[in-house]
Amino acid sequence: MKRSAEAAAPPVAARELTAVSADGSRIHVELHGPDDAPAVVLAHGWTCSTHFWAAQIRDLSADHRVIAYDQRGHGRTPAAVKAGHSTEALADDLEAVLATALEPGTKAVLAGHSMGGMTLMAAAGRPKFAEHAVAALLCSTGSSRLVAESLVVPLRPGPVRTRITRSILGSRAPLGPVTPLSKRILRYGTMGPGSAPEKVAECARIVHACPRPARVAWARVLAELDLDAGVRELRVPTAVVAGTADRLTPITHARALAEALPECVGLDELTGMGHMTPVEAPEAVSGRIRALVNAYLKQEEKAV
């Protein structure tokens, strides 16, 4: 059964803030839910926006304070200067969001999807991360070798596949309007084979709305990504969620993260799901965030 237009619309924020990053970049931040509820911070992935977390915001904001923000160059956050695309910039932006949206010392569960998960890894050793993060969720992400291990191109692993994958992901070609063909391409590359048409359409609208300069600039950063050291710095209880049919960050990345994390508290392998797990399996992702809140944030509050 198709969702109503009202249910499909992105949630309206209770309040909006602007965080100012280390280089002066202005980051769009949305607050949902009660101010005095347990806090959850959501960081979206490459070519997405706060709209990507719509299902989690609807679910969690009933009894959580949900903080979602647009990564630089995405959604309502302006494009960065040419030199402003790096994992250090991602960490700077997250620190700015935490400082702006949370009171000093307030703890939160941080969840990142894809590039958002990489943001958590990049920021793991930062002071604001240590001050505010009580637990984390890494969702459909990886820390290195993203191009080499991608399965988007159906060839054997090797230099040829790597070159073709790099050229596809970093292509400067405009995505254009959402069409039946573009939805089929997006579904193949980023979603599980059983994804419902309305979920494919939802992801297509979000991805196609990403400005081309941001898409290309961040693709170059991701192609050279090496955050293995950041994984080892992620010393809060951390859960990992990934789809078994993910072509962009195959399940091997999730298993490697679970093995390398200092305190991994669970690896959820979602059978048949692709890269867009918060949209494809919203109940599973929201449920894991709730479990982290209950296990770590509420216990922290009781201890204070």
Image (spheres, grey):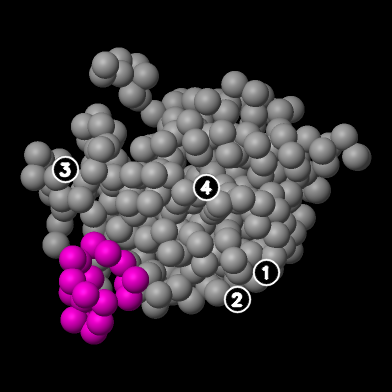
Kindly indicate the quadrant of the structure image that contains residue 232.
bottom right
Question: Could you tell me how far apart the alpha carbons at marks 2 and 1 are, in whole angstroms?
Answer: 7 Å
In the picture, which quadrant includes the N terminus? Answer: top left
Question: Can you tell which mark lies on residue 233?
Answer: 1
> To which residue does mark 2 refer?
229
Question: Can you tell which mark lies on residue 183?
Answer: 3
- Residue at horizontal 56 percent and vertical 33 percent from the top: 287
- Residue at horizontal 47 percent and vertical 49 percent from the top: 269
Tell which circle, 4 or 2, labels the residue nearer the N-terminal end: 2
> To which residue does mark 4 refer?
268
Considering the numbered disc 3 on the image, is that residue within a helix, a strand or a loop?
helix
- Residue at horizontal 25 percent and vertical 32 percent from the top: 196
Classify residue 253 as left or right of residue 219.
right
> What's drawn in magenta, residue-wise?
147-165
Residue 271: percent from left, percent from top? 39, 44
Residue 280: percent from left, percent from top? 36, 38
| Amino acid type of the residue tagged 1 in the rendering | Glu
Residue 29 colored in magenta in the image: no
Say whether marks 2 and 3 touch (CB < 8 Å): no
| Amino acid type of the residue tagged 2 in the rendering | Ala
Q: Residues within 10 Å of mark 4 (few under 14, many from 20)?
A: some
Q: Residues within 10 Å of mark 1 (few under 14, many from 20)?
A: some
Q: Is residue 263 visible?
A: yes
| Amino acid type of the residue tagged 4 in the rendering | Asp
Question: Could you tell me how far apart the alpha carbons at marks 4 and 2 are, in whole angstroms?
Answer: 23 Å
